[in-house]
Image (spheres, rainbow, N blue to C red):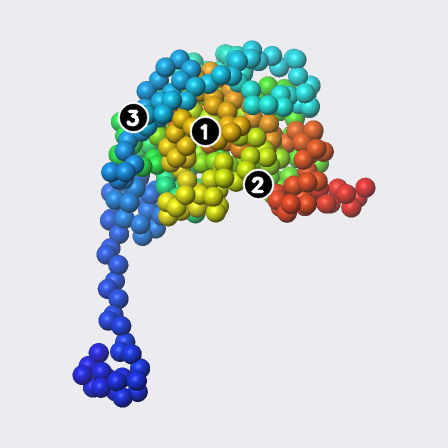
Amino acid sequence: MTPAQRILASVRNTPPAPPPIAPPPPATPPTDAIDAAKQRLAPGVPLESWLRSADSPPPAMYLAPSTVTVSGASFTDAHPRVPFSDATYDPCGDDLPRLPTVWVGLAAGWPSLRSGWNAPVLAARCAPGELFAVDGGPGFARNALHAASVPMAAYAAYAAEEGAARGDVAPLYIFDAQLSTRRFADGAPFSAEFSVPACLSHDEMAKRGGADTAAARPLPARWLLVGAAGSGTPIHNHPLTAAWNTLLCGVKLWVVLPPNAPPEALLLGDACPAEGDEDLSAAAWVRHWGGALPAGAQVIVQRAGETVFLPAAWWHVVLNVASSTAVSSSVYLRRDWEELGAAAVERGECEGFARVFRAEAARA
Ligand SMILES: O=C(O)CCC(=O)C(=O)O
């Protein structure tokens, strides 16, 4: 402001204009695929913001048979392991478990389990230019889900320092929806190395959705998940789809809560402790509760070869305690369509499903 402008401002009794705002410092230029992915997920946020601070120390994780310790708190899994037998379940999945269940044996014989499909194994088999979608990161990065991708080799190097991932407070996590169509560099399909049991193959949406089937599904049905130690999936539920998740290598800590868990147990929305974001990372959620989980919470410590089956609408938060690879799937079961569908539509949830549900009701 010039002296003349200052005098004019005082005569008019208007406050002097504030000093010009200094332009923001230029964002750290990305140096590699991981940094570039972080900048796509959280544009303008300095890369230093991804680092742990003094009050969020490294998770210090170690393993015992059915217990994991995260940041000093122990989590013990009391779930019996249930041998999986496809033939015992109805082909429409109506008699699948009504409670969270850990199956063993579903993946017996999968080549992906034999070779472990860990990040270095996948990196060695994928063409260098093959890109995989990454999610994860702290809350500030979660408004841009599926906005970035990295080569598997870059991710393998990032995840290699067990528990470190360059010191990121919530590491990036490969969450890739192209699993069903991907091929290795030699042309072999990924899908030849795992299989889907008959009782988990029925998809009521495919049967009822007609031309709207693909658009009506909020999320793809199958994902490849490759996560560095400390990465994870924040708490969420799938109101209408059952999920099954087979671990090929590593260890996952699941905390699952029933569909009617209260908001203060979930730490969503207003109940979320202020961390500058609306979505606590899995690590931050687990750290918040420590060993004193809210009433009704169940712990699962999932090992390679085990499959977690989660009925529709159960809440879950999942932390990769060691670098992990999993195949994760979701299905619309016939029973859930009938039992949960109308209430979900009434609550205004599941827009695509509601469209199909209402179209069907109008035809009836
Ligand atoms: O393994 C994980 O990170 C959990 C995946 C998950 O929650 C999901 O696919 O719905």
On the image, the x and y values in percent for residue 155 come to: 33, 32
Measured in 3D between alpha carbons, the distance from the residue under mark 1 to the one under mark 2, in whole angstroms, is: 30 Å
What secondary structure is marked by label 3? loop
Question: Quarter of the image holding residue 10?
Answer: bottom left
Tag in front: 1 or 2: 1
Q: Quadrant of the C terminus?
A: top right
Instruction: Say whether residue 86 is left or right of residue 181.
Output: right
Q: Amino acid at mark 2?
A: Pro
Relative image position of residue 209 (x, y in whole percent): 68, 39
User: Is residue 232 shown left or right of residue 8?
Assistant: right
How many labels, in total? 3
Callout 1: SS: loop
Q: Closer to the N terminus: mark 1 or mark 2?
A: 2
Q: Nearer the viewer, mark 2 or mark 3?
A: 3
Identity of the amino acid at label 1? Leu
- Quarter location, residue 62: top left
**Real-space Cα separation, disc 2 to disc 3, in angstroms:** 36 Å
Look at mark 1 in the image and give the residue it sits on.
Answer: 293
**Marks 2 and 3: CB-CB under 8 Å?**
no
Q: Residue at the spot x=41%, y=22% of the render?
A: 75
Residue located at (65% from left, 41% from top): 344
Residue at mark 2: 218
Picture disc at residue 39: none
Q: Residue furthest left?
A: 3
- Circle 3 is placed at which residue position? 60
* Distance of label 1 from label 3 (alpha carbons): 19 Å
Whether residue 325 is visible here, answered yes or no, is no
Q: Is mark 1 within 8 Å of ligand 1?
A: no
